Image (cartoon, rainbow, N blue to C red):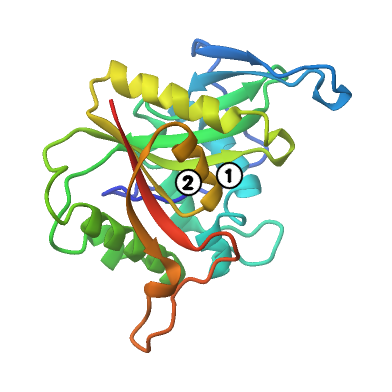
Amino acid sequence: METVLSSNLANSGRIDANKTNFAKDVPKIARYTLADSTDNNIGMDYHIQIVTKDDKLRILKFLRRFFFRDEPLNHSIQLIPESEDSTCIELEEYCSMSTLENNLSLMAVSTSGAIVGVLLNGKMDPPCDEEPEYITTCENPKFKKILRLLRYVDKNVNRDGQYQGLDILEIRIISVDTNWRGKGIGKALVEKAIEIGKEKDFHMVRADCSSSFSGKLCARLGFERIYELKYADYVDEDGDPIFCPAFPHTSIITYIKKL
């Protein structure tokens, strides 16, 4: 669920830590109270709201801290250099494309105004026979490997054409603040995405899960498992695996949920 592909990569700038734009007029969609008798949960309340283009810098800053390094594929090929301020511009562009402006992506925001969870979604593009330009022109060889893996998965999922012509809401990235994990934020974000998908007349929701954790979340929410590619079976010209994520991340699995 961490990395899924779109047909276009829009331009985006680097993150300026001193600029934090927040959409004050965006209505709060839902509120969740996590506080219970445990002291360290006191005050852990949040609400979910739609992401807008004004949230771009805050979203990217959050993902740089909690997603870019930890996502299994990124970590496996060391996509992000070991430096506090390092990043991958191509990955930032992927994260800030139309998913931030289509009223489909969501973020969980604490009562203090901090982002504690992000779910980037988009409408899937129809499959194409030729390798898209955004892959062939990608100048980062490591990120190109990820893009090609995702295209390989997409081609296999659509091999029989059973999903052609359907409007599919794609869950592209999910990330939760490490201090808030295990509190149901990921579940709440996906459930809200399903609601939005129904409201906007999508036929189904799809997620390509590169992490076993996101895969388990989809399974718990009633998604159907339709395709699995073991990383050990995705090899280069010499027969060596291209990605070797740490256990338990052994496969990339596609899940769908009909709406």
* Number of residue marks: 2
The residue pinned by badge 1 equals 63
- Give the mark nearer the N terminus: 1 vs 2: 1
Per the rendering, the mark at residue 161 is none
- In the rendered image of this protein, does residue 113 appear above or below residue 61? above
Residue 234 in picture, x, y percent from top left: 37, 72
Residue 39 in picture, x, y percent from top left: 88, 23
Residue placed most toward the observer, 101 or 79: 79
- In the rendered image of this protein, does residue 129 appear above or below residue 233? above
Please tell me whether mark 1 sits on a helix, a strand or a loop: helix
Quadrant housing the C terminus? top left
Residue 21 in picture, x, y percent from top left: 57, 27
Residue placed most toward the observer, 138 or 108: 108
Q: Residues within 10 Å of mark 1 (few under 14, many from 20)?
A: many
Residue ID at (33%, 86%): 237
- In the rendered image of this protein, does residue 68 appear above or below residue 97? below
- Is residue 85 found left or right of 122 in the rendered image? right
Please tell me whether mark 2 sits on a helix, a strand or a loop: helix
Residue ID at (37%, 62%): 229
Instruction: Tell me the amino acid under the disc marked 2.
Output: Gly
The residue pinned by badge 2 equals 215
The answer to whether marks 1 and 2 mark residues whose Cβ atoms lie closer than 8 Å is no
Instruction: Tell me the amino acid under the disc marked 1.
Output: Leu
